[in-house]
Amino acid sequence: MPNVTIYTDGSSLGNPGRGGYGIVLLSPPYRKELSAGFRLTTNNRMELMAVCVALEALKFDGTDVTLYSDSKYVVDSVEKGWVFGWERGGFAKAKNPDLWQRFLRVYRRHRVKFVWVKGHASTVENNRCDQLAVAAASGPNLAEDVGYNPAE
């Protein structure tokens, strides 16, 4: 199976507010950039949605993935096992349960290692993801984040 390096970032212009995500997928010699924007969402939703979309974009199950994110919310939730506790509890106490369920479906198809990176630092690809996310959030004709729940 191929080894893939993924960088993700989410951004919101107001929290809640307009939001977007940016993704850079690297599987040399290939490079793919993805992004999308939403009318009303949160930063955490965009961070998590970026990870979901990135993993869903992989062509082969069983891919070895190193995923770089500047989101402590996402990285700690997985690496510290919180998401698996939320799953056992039916996501009753979790925010963004729709995205965590989506994440777990695709996460289990691959071998994913998360690496936290400092946001807005010297990580070139993470900075590119931030540019993609902000541009997507600033664009016209933004989609609806149908899972966004203002009560969460």
Image (cartoon, grey):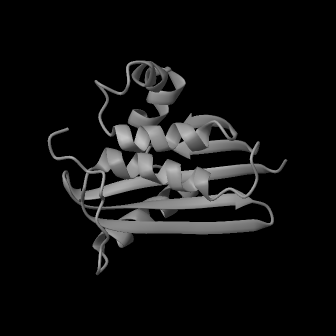
Q: Residue at x 76, y 42 (%)?
A: 62
Report if residue 122 is visible in the image.
no
Residue 119: x and y in percent read: 42, 47
Furthest residue toward front: 90
Q: Is residue 74 above or below residue 143?
A: above
Instruction: Tell me if residue 14 comes above or below residue 75 in the rendering.
Output: below
The spot of residue 137 in percent (x, y) is 31, 68
Q: Quadrant of residue 124?
A: bottom right
Instruction: Point out the image quarter for the C terminus.
Output: top left
Which residue is pictured at 34% across the width and 56% down the height? 11
- Indicate the position of residue 76 as horizontal and vertical percent values: 46, 28
Q: Residue 141's x, y, as percent?
A: 29, 80
Q: Is residue 113 left or right of residue 38?
A: right
Check the image and name the residue furthest to the right: 1
Q: Nearer the viewer, residue 131 or 109?
A: 109
- Kindly identify the residue that appears in the image at 31 percent across and 77 percent down: 139
Seen at 21% across and 46% down, the residue is 149
Q: Is residue 109 visible?
A: yes
Residue 50 versus residue 127: which sits nearer the camera?
A: 50
23 sits left or right of 119 in the view: right
State left or right for residue 149 relative to residue 11: left
